[in-house]
Amino acid sequence: MNMTLVDRFLHYVSFDTQSDELTNMTPSTPGQMVFAQALEQELRRVGLTEITLDENGYLMATLPANTDKKLPTVGFIAHLDTAPDMTGRNVQPRIVKGYDGGDIVLCADENVVLRPNEFPELLNYVGQDLIVTNGKTLLGADDKAGIAEIITAMEYLIAHPEIEHGKIRVAFNPDEEIGLGAHKFDVEAFGADWAYTLDGGEIGELEYENFNAAGAKITFKGRNVHPGMAKDKMINSMLVANQYIAMLPEKDRPEHTEGYEGFYHLIAMEGNVEQTTISYIIRDHDRAKFEARKEELKRIADKLNERYPGCVEVEVKDQYYNMREKVEPVIYIIDLVSQAMRNIDIEPKVKPIRGGTDGAQLSFKGLPCPNIFAGGVNFHGRYEYVPIRSMEKASELVVEIARLVAQGK
């Protein structure tokens, strides 16, 4: 029996697939492989071919072309895991029918309420059916909505052979939420000319710019002396760390930035008098500004080392880069999806991602891969929800992209 898009999504969120950056395994958690194996069987039932699931949890499949035209192969990608930020175990979603614009009580016992005065975008969905959480877990629309939308679109194309399309490849990968989704993705085996991740937020989102990203670990070595005899001898590493933090521009923090503005984000701090370690993530859309930010971290360290010789060590590692430089040479893939959106009465909302995406790393591996909406809102927490109409339009969009590719548009 065929599953509806909503049934499919409600089933998928029952799988516990949180990723975990501490396991050093791929996939990082066993639940992701369990989910991938279930999807593998579903893809067979739907009628896809060339289905492969490797030992790392990367699931790929093909919808063969139904035309003799020589057409490019387009891919659609979504990720298996949910974010570690909030539990994804025992997700119990419910459907709010015809949302009336008021407060939505998610959990009365814990007074968890989804309020439009706190989440004003809710009012964009008045009259629509929303899938929400029970206030105790995340929902998992990021990115199980994307998976459901892609598979539903493939099923629709199989059931409607009158819609001409070329070869389509689909892939579902682990560990996107911990930044590792593209690391073991076999671009050559996938074999697409370009692809789209369905991993964006609200309806209409279309993204082909993201942050350049790096992580920094800064270590401060102090000198511990009995406080009663510490004059001119003690160096308190925690206080030096605080000086370092204060020397970075206060306005270049996430809470003060938006749009294309970059930032330094302090994410961890641990220490004592003898040694303190702080961790930053560095983000900027502009590559030159990104490089300057990394140099600033080292410049401040040099300045403090003049005062406290040998005290500060900085280790910076790049994480990913802005995919724009890889997508702009093939900008027609953006024009194509923009036209597809308009064809199904969606106004494209092109904007930069203030974060990262598997598509960025895949673009640098040779697979241009912009990101389009999956429909969810308030990802990674108990206030997450997804409008059913947004999911339906995302699935319809996949079909329309396939149709336009076959027309050579």
Image: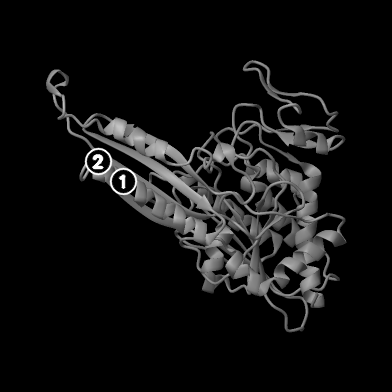
Number of marks in picture: 2
Relative to residue 300, is residue 367 depicted above or below? below
Quadrant of res 347: bottom right
Residue 401 drawn at (x, y percent): 77, 66
**Mark 2: which amino acid?**
Arg
Q: Amino acid at mark 1?
A: Lys
Secondary structure beneath disc 1? helix
Secondary structure of the residue carrying numbered label 2: helix
Q: Give the vertical position of 32 relative to 273 (above or below).
A: below
Residue 345: assigned label? none
| Residue at 72 percent of width and 72 percent of height | 332
Nearer to the camera, 206 or 255: 255
Report crowding for label 2: few under 14, some 14 to 19, many 20 or more residues within 10 A (C-alpha): few
Out of 327 and 254, give the one closest to the viewer. 254
Q: Is residue 86 above or below residue 189?
A: above
Residue 158 appears in the picture as rendered: no
Circles 2 and 1 in contact, beta carbons < 8 Å: yes
Please tell me which residue is depicted at 31% across the width and 38% down the height of the picture: 277
Q: Is residue 297 left or right of residue 403?
A: left
CA–CA distance between discs 2 and 1? 7 Å
Report which residue position mark 1 lands on.
303
Q: Which mark is residue 307?
A: 2
User: Dividing the image into 4 quarters, which one contains the C terminus?
Assistant: bottom right
At which x and y percent is residue 125? 82, 38
Q: Residue at x 72, y 66 (%)?
A: 334
Which x, y percent locates residue 158?
A: 77, 65
Measured as percent of width and height from the top left, residue 120 is found at 76, 33
